[in-house]
């Protein structure tokens, strides 16, 4: 049924417009009590497989990656799909419109997306209001249905790189009190100069400042770690040597984990005419073609940190077998996004249930 809807309704439509339409429809349905309950019965059945990671109890290991809900307006509605955690953002200290449209493209033959959104969002202050409202709405649900909420923060485009630390701190002060965990995003290819902040010299003061700012504004963290867990999201295009350096930096500065990986700027991962199209366009590629490099980076990070950091794997996950493979390779949690555009709202619950039939997805509650 979803394939038919996708072909007849969404495929002819601009990809960003289709996203807003489907997201708005889900939020409207969730607000209607009877329909909201029906959504959870249909989509989220059998998705409970609790696991303790980052000092938090996640309903299961599969979450929604940042980028889908940029402003934290639909956390409760998205939880109806069965996700164990939902990462909102990327949020910047100041509101910004993002890059010019069109800026989101489907690469159908490759089961991929190309985006150059540019951190379009309403800013940290508005996001704090949105997430507060969503937490109130989630409190009406049984505890087992409430997802963990991650907050992904990035640098405002107009802020010079020299002022990046202060910009990240401003977002942290607004959002850390509402976050179950925080993510520093220095790996999007769509904000000029942002990826340069992945260098050890640039990243170290950001991690330190965000960690300290979160400690100042959060008196009672939800995590049993005693602080708001802090992770860094890195790009797949880093050299292996740079990945190892960031791993060492994260351990040294007291970060709690890494998210591997963001979108890629490597057009060689694509095949056919869509590769030619992508070479003519700016932006990062996500979806199935990202899987090989994302898995490589995951394995490298897991071997380097040897259990000292939590690892969240994202990039190219297509089914429950992929979920199991990422956990087997060292991931504590996984995140998805692009494949849901092609496979529809039943897909998250399906991969959670199929992954849950392996021991990998439910290997314990105190193992990470």
Image (cartoon, helix red, strand yellow):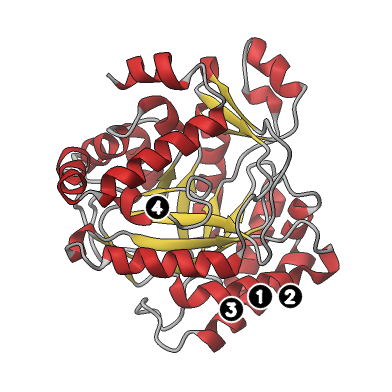
The reply to whether discs 3 and 1 touch (Cβ–Cβ < 8 Å) is yes
Which of label 2 and label 4 is nearer to you? 4
329 lies left or right of 34: right
Q: Are marks 2 and 1 in contact (CB under 8 Å)?
A: yes
Q: In which quadrant of the rendered image does the C terminus lie?
A: bottom left
- Using the numbered discs, state the Cα–Cα distance from disc 2 to disc 3 in whole angstroms: 11 Å
Distance between the alpha carbons at the discs numbered 2 and 1:
6 Å
Q: Which residue is drawn at 36% across and 39% down?
A: 25
Disc 2 from disc 4: Cα separation: 28 Å
Residue corresponding to mark 1: 170
Please provide percent x and percent y for residue 226. 41, 83
The structure residue drawn at horizontal position 55% and vertical position 28%, both measured from the top left corner, is 15
Badge 1 crowding class, 10 Å Cα cut-off, few under 14, some 14 to 19, many 20 or more, is some
Residue 74's tag is: 4
Q: Is disc 4 surrounded by few (<14), some (14 to 19) or many (20+) residues within 10 Å?
A: many
Q: Answer with the quarter of the image where residue 318 lies.
A: top left
Instruction: Give the secondary structure at mark 2.
Output: helix
x then y, percent, for residue 94:
68, 64
* Residue 336 shows in this picture: yes
């Amino acid at each position: 049924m979803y394939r038919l809807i996708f072909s007849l309704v969404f495929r002819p439509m601009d990809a960003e417009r289709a996203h807003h339409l489907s997201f708005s429809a889900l939020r409207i349905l969730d607000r209607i009590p009877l329909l909201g309950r029906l959504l959870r019965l249909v989509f989220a059945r059998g998705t409970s497989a609790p696991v303790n990671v980052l000092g938090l109890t996640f309903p299961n290991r599969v979450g929604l990656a940042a980028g889908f809900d940029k402003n934290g307006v639909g956390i409760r509605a998205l939880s109806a799909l069965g996700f164990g955690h939902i990462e909102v953002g990327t949020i910047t200290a100041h509101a910004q419109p993002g890059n010019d449209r069109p800026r989101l493209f489907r690469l159908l033959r490759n089961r991929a997306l190309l985006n150059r959104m540019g951190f379009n969002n309403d800013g940290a202050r508005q996001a704090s209001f949105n997430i507060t409202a969503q937490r109130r709405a989630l409190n009406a649900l049984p505890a087992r249905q409430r997802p963990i909420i991650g907050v992904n923060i990035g640098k405002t485009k107009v802020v010079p790189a020299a002022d990046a630390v202060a910009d990240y701190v401003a977002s942290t002060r607004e959002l850390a009190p509402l976050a179950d965990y925080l993510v520093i995003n220095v790996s999007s290819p769509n904000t000029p100069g942002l990826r340069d902040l992945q260098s050890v010299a640039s990243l170290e003061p950001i991690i330190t400042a965000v960690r300290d700012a979160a400690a100042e504004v959060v008196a009672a963290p939800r995590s049993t770690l005693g602080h708001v867990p802090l992770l860094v999201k890195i790009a797949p295009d880093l050299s292996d040597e740079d990945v190892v350096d960031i791993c060492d930096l994260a351990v040294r500065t007291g970060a709690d984990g890494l998210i591997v990986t963001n979108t890629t700027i490597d057009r060689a991962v694509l095949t056919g005419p869509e590769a030619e199209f992508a070479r003519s366009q700016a932006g990062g590629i996500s979806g199935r073609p990202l899987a090989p490099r994302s898995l490589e980076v995951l394995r490298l990070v897991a071997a380097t940190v040897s259990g000292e950091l939590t690892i969240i794997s994202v990039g190219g996950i297509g089914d429950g077998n992929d979920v199991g493979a990422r956990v087997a390779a060292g991931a504590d949690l996984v995140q998805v996004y692009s494949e849901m555009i092609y496979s529809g709202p039943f897909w998250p619950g399906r991969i959670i249930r199929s992954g849950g039939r392996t021991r990998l997805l439910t290997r314990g509650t105190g193992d990470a």
